[in-house]
Image (tube, coloured by chain):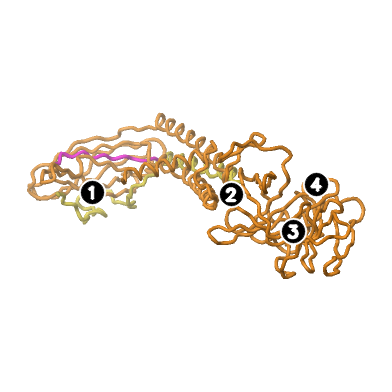
Amino acid sequence: MSSGGPTPAGAPQVKSLNCPSCGATLTLRSFSHAVTIVCDSCHSILDAQDPRLKILQTFQAATDEDPPLIPLGTRGSIRGTAYEAVGFQRRTIHVDGVPYSWHEYILFNPFQGFRYLTEYNGHWNDVSILRSLPICSPGASTLNYLGETYRLFQTATAGTSFVLGEFPWQVRVGETVEVCDYVSPPRVISSEKTGTEVTWSMGEYVAGRDIWKAFKLQGDPPAPIGVYENQPSPLSENVKLVWSLVAAFVILLVAMLLFIYSTARDEQVFEQSYEFNTNIKREASFVTDPFELKGHTSDVELTTRARVDNNWIYLNYTLINQDNGHAYDFGREVSYYHGYDEDGSWSEGGTQDTVTVPSVPPGNYYLRVEPESDYYRGAIYYTITLKRDVPQLSFFGLGALALLFPAGLVTWRSLNFEHLRWAESDYGGSPDDGSFLSTIENAVDSVKSMSGDDDE
Amino acid sequence: MIRTFFLIYGVAILAGVSLAEYRGWSLNRVDEVLNVPKSVRDNPGSYRSVYGYYHHYTGGK
């Protein structure tokens, strides 16, 4: 759909008639193509094929009961072809006693014939009659048209509740049709069954702003409310793209992990065993021999292994650069408790602790160590080991989470959009169309049903 | 649009992880102290650790 397209050659041709009921002037825009014409003054439905305009039906309605958003006679360009709005009707279905109405606009081009626009709650569809029949089996919930699968969305009995302008069929207020909608966003295939006659049409979702642009209408189109049956999800196409990018980045992250683990220095620079006698009260702090930290600014990993058994030892560590006095101060505790009670055996803690000191520049260092524990618990033996430039797996984990988060968000929003769509369907549920999104949704449903089984 | 955003975002994540690994960042909390006197080496008891009065876990169920 585009604006500013070609208009029919010459000035608009119309034919003026008079309503045989009220005498008002009628404008016939589609000439012999019109089967019925509605007088907008007295709401008489007239036989446009009859030279005397035989009155077929009269219905009660206020003139401004339901003014068309596209005034009749307005011309616009759809897919490069000029059309004129010649007719308007409102159709209504009732669900649980609640009426739901939508509007249909009949468009006419002398060379292309009729075309239709539908509008419901600000959602628009460009509709044309199908030239060939879709493939569907009786009772099936899907149909196939030109290789594309459409899923049954709803069936309803729709009644015509208001008409205006010209129609290429014998329109009557109060007439009903059985309507079935099959969706494959952004398209919808609809069947309208009257008696034994079935008419198939295809609609394609159009943004209201494009309709306004095409018909050069004043103001803004009504804002869409909710999610419409064939409204394309703004995110569904992005889901596969985002997950493809996530997969590529995760592969790069793993490659980077392997590279860093294979090239990191991971060098042991110090290891010494000590004894802390808790039976002697004296100054316990001491310093280690100096050791050199080589390479660029990197981390230092300190591991404490202590032979504690239902006991604890706390070590105040200070890693001191002996050249400039810059120090890193931290404390670590090693405790291990175990026992047996009415619940069976239990244990807490462990005999080893590891801490990473971040971003330590190269230089000559020593450790000040100050052990603490309960008094009179005997000797506690412990070993201190220092390693330089040790890869940290936690950052790769955080990186992977950071990559997955927006992908999960996009997927969740897309799934939510589909849930809102199918919540309006008579045949709600997870669409299993083989798409990437439906695969994810079915997996989520499977997990939910499994957890539901567990609950039972 | 979203492709460009995600490409930039992904590259930023990889660059961040690379930098964190190269510079040796850590999630552990460590206090930095400046100008520790050289006398600490000869008299370790003269230094007072930030964590000297830490409340110790006494363990047990």
Name the mark nearer the viewer: 4 or 3. Answer: 3
Q: Which residue is mark 2?
A: A155
Q: Mark 1 touching mark 2, by CB under 8 A?
A: no
Label 2 to label 4, Cα distance in Å? 33 Å
Which percent across, then down, holds residue A202? 69, 45
Name the mark nearer the viewer: 2 or 4. Answer: 2
Which percent across, then down, holds residue A73? 82, 59
Q: Which residue is mark 4?
A: A80
Label 2 to label 3, Cα distance in Å? 23 Å
Label the magenta part by its dominant secondary structure. Answer: strand
Sequence-earlier tag: 2 or 3: 3
Q: Secondary structure at mark 1?
A: strand
Q: Secondary structure at mark 2?
A: strand
Which percent across, then down, holds residue B33? 32, 52
Outermost residue on the right side: it is: A10
Q: Nearer the viewer, residue A64 or A344?
A: A64
Residue A187 visible within the image? no
Q: Residue at x 15, y 43 (%)?
A: A346
Q: Nearer the viewer, residue A427 or A263?
A: A427
Name the mark nearer the viewer: 1 or 2. Answer: 2
Name the mark nearer the viewer: 4 or 1. Answer: 4
Q: Chain of mark 4?
A: A
* Chain represented in yellow: B
Where are the magenta residues, as a range? A297-308
Q: Which residue is mark 3?
A: A88
- The answer to whether A211 is drawn above or below residue A189 in the figure is below
Q: Residue at x 36, y 36 (%)?
A: A390
Label 4 to label 3, Cα distance in Å? 22 Å
Q: Which residue is mark 1?
A: A316
Query: Residue type at mark 2?
Result: Thr
